[in-house]
Amino acid sequence: MWIEYRGIRVVNHHRPMSTYLQALIGAGLTLTYFDEPVPSMEAPSKKAEHYCRVPWFLVMEWMKPAS
């Protein structure tokens, strides 16, 4: 699907998170850490409450087992 934002047009290839996770697991990696950081409610934003309900960032740590 083509997406345009502020005069920049790019092709967006939507893939669900499961596609990425299955690829990493399939490569033999092990998920060791997962977090969805959110801004504090004191953040200077009218949308801080919304950002606390919707993940904008995911932090993951993957380990490759020793061979």
Image (tube, rainbow, N blue to C red):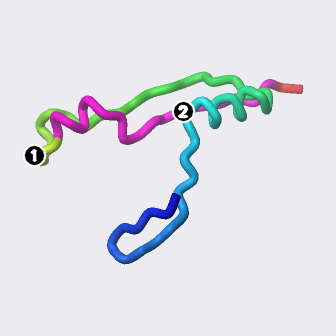
Q: Could you say which is closer to the camera, residue 40 or residue 24?
A: 24
Q: Could you say which is closer to the camera, residue 11 or residue 47?
A: 11
Dot 1 falls on a residue whose secondary structure is loop
CB atoms of marks 1 and 2 within 8 Å: no
Which residue extends farthest right? 67
- Compared to 15, does 5 lie above or below? below
Dot 2 falls on a residue whose secondary structure is strand
At label 1, counting other C-alpha atoms closer than 10 Å, the crowd grade (few under 14, some 14-19, many 20 or more) is: few
Q: Which amino acid lies under the numbered mark 1 shown in the image of this protein?
A: Lys
**Toward which corner of the image does residue 21 lie, by quadrant?**
top right
Of mark 1 and mark 2, the one earlier in the sequence is: 1
Which residue range is magenta in the image? 48-65
Residue 63, position as x, y percentages in the image: 69, 29
Q: Could you say which is closer to the camera, residue 3 or residue 64?
A: 3
Residue 64, position as x, y percentages in the image: 76, 30
The image quadrant where one finds the C terminus is top right
Instruction: Find disc 1 in the rendering and name its residue.
Output: 46
- Determine if the magenta segment contains residue 54: yes
User: Which disc, if any, is residue 56?
Assistant: none
Q: What residue do we see at 37% from left, 77% from top?
A: 7
Residue 35, position as x, y percentages in the image: 44, 27
At label 2, counting other C-alpha atoms closer than 10 Å, the crowd grade (few under 14, some 14-19, many 20 or more) is: few
- Determine if the magenta segment contains residue 53: yes
| Cα gap from disc 1 to disc 2, whole angstroms | 28 Å
Instruction: Find disc 2 in the rendering and name its residue.
Output: 60
**Toward which corner of the image does residue 6 lie, by quadrant?**
bottom left
Q: What residue do we see at 57% from left, 53% from top?
A: 13
Q: Could you say which is closer to the camera, residue 5 or residue 28?
A: 5
28 to the left or right of 10: right
Callout in the foreground (1, 2): 1
Q: Which amino acid lies under the numbered mark 2 shown in the image of this protein?
A: Met
39 to the left or right of 6: left
